[in-house]
Image: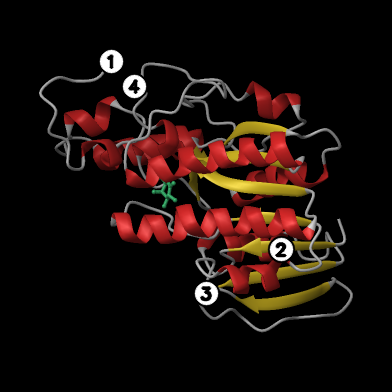
Amino acid sequence: MQRVLITGAGGGIGRSLRETLRGVYPVLRVSDRVPLAPARSGNEGIEEVDHTDIADMAQVERMVEGVDGIIHLGGISGENTWEKILEGNIVGLYNVFEAARRAGVKRIVMATSNHAVGFYPRSQTIDHRVVPRPDSRYGVSKAFSEALASLYADKHGIGFLCTRIGNFGTRPIDSRRLSIWISPRDYTQLARIGLEHPDIRYEIVYGVSDNRRSWYDNSNAVRLGYRPQDDSEPQAAEILAAEAGKPRDPIAERYQGGTFCADDYDAETLPE
Ligand code: 15L
């Protein structure tokens, strides 16, 4: 990998990867539709800063020019109106994959989400083979991203690592996140596997740390060499004590997607 592109580089994960991947590849191109910090150069590699709205194919074609691998974080990162999801996560995603195909890009690490499978109950441990159970319009767009990646892998030979990210941050922020948290250094490791592993065609893995309370069987990531360094457990006692006695939504508590499942919920019976 000579030149690696990070889309959505202005978001939390993008800003973090810009630091942790600095100097790992000779050129790091960072892109977003929001303004980014100016490019740096020097011993730790060259940065290129790009400004692109992924809903516009002409801009996307320029963004991917000369790139060997992409970490695609761009688009909408939570529940939103259908119009915004359509623009960022359906049209925008298609533009990135299609422009990448035309430009001969060989590898894409993609941010899908736990919300593609958010309606699995917390009582169930799920692996990379389960069928999607989206918990929101956002979750549907992430299931779509996994399906589009599968098409571009099978038909066009682009290698995809689809990372179903839990919750990225320096520490878990609540009891649900104790099960799905991922630290910056663990996500960096996973992204590097996605770009550098010699035999990736189409793989789904969970973007989570080695959390004792995990709901995921992440053996597919382990098979690819992932050795997470972090576990949310040291924060558990403090988080659980802070939440003790607070009212809890029964739908949010039952399913892995939490409040994404509870929002707008009006079915009369609970899905299994
Ligand atoms: C996600 O997919 C979102 O991008 C992030 O903002 C969080 O909401 C996260 O899931 C989560 O489930 O905590």
**Which quadrant would residue 82 be assigned to in this image?**
bottom left
Q: Which secondary structure, mark 1?
A: loop
Callout 1 touching callout 4 (CB < 8 Å): yes
For residue 121, the mark is: 4
Seen from the viewer's position, the closer of residues 122 and 134 is 134
Tell whether 123 sits left or right of 43. left
Kindly identify the amino acid type of the residue bearing the numbered disc 2.
Leu
Q: From the top left corner, tell me how far across and down residue 68 is, in percent.
A: 81, 57
Residue at label 1? 272
Could you tell me how far apart the alpha carbons at marks 1 and 4 are, in whole angstroms? 7 Å
Kindly identify the amino acid type of the residue bearing the numbered disc 4.
Pro
Could you tell me how far apart the alpha carbons at marks 4 and 2 are, in whole angstroms? 36 Å
Residue at 53 percent of width and 70 percent of height: 56
Q: Residues within 10 Å of mark 2 (few under 14, many from 20)?
A: many
Q: Which secondary structure, mark 2?
A: strand
For residue 5, the mark is: 2
Residue at label 3? 33
Could you tell me how far apart the alpha carbons at marks 3 and 2 are, in whole angstroms? 14 Å
Q: From the top left corner, tell me how far across and down residue 112 is, in percent.
A: 52, 43
Could you tell me how far apart the alpha carbons at marks 4 and 3 are, in whole angstroms? 36 Å
Q: Residues within 10 Å of mark 4 (few under 14, many from 20)?
A: many
Q: Residues within 10 Å of mark 3 (few under 14, many from 20)?
A: some
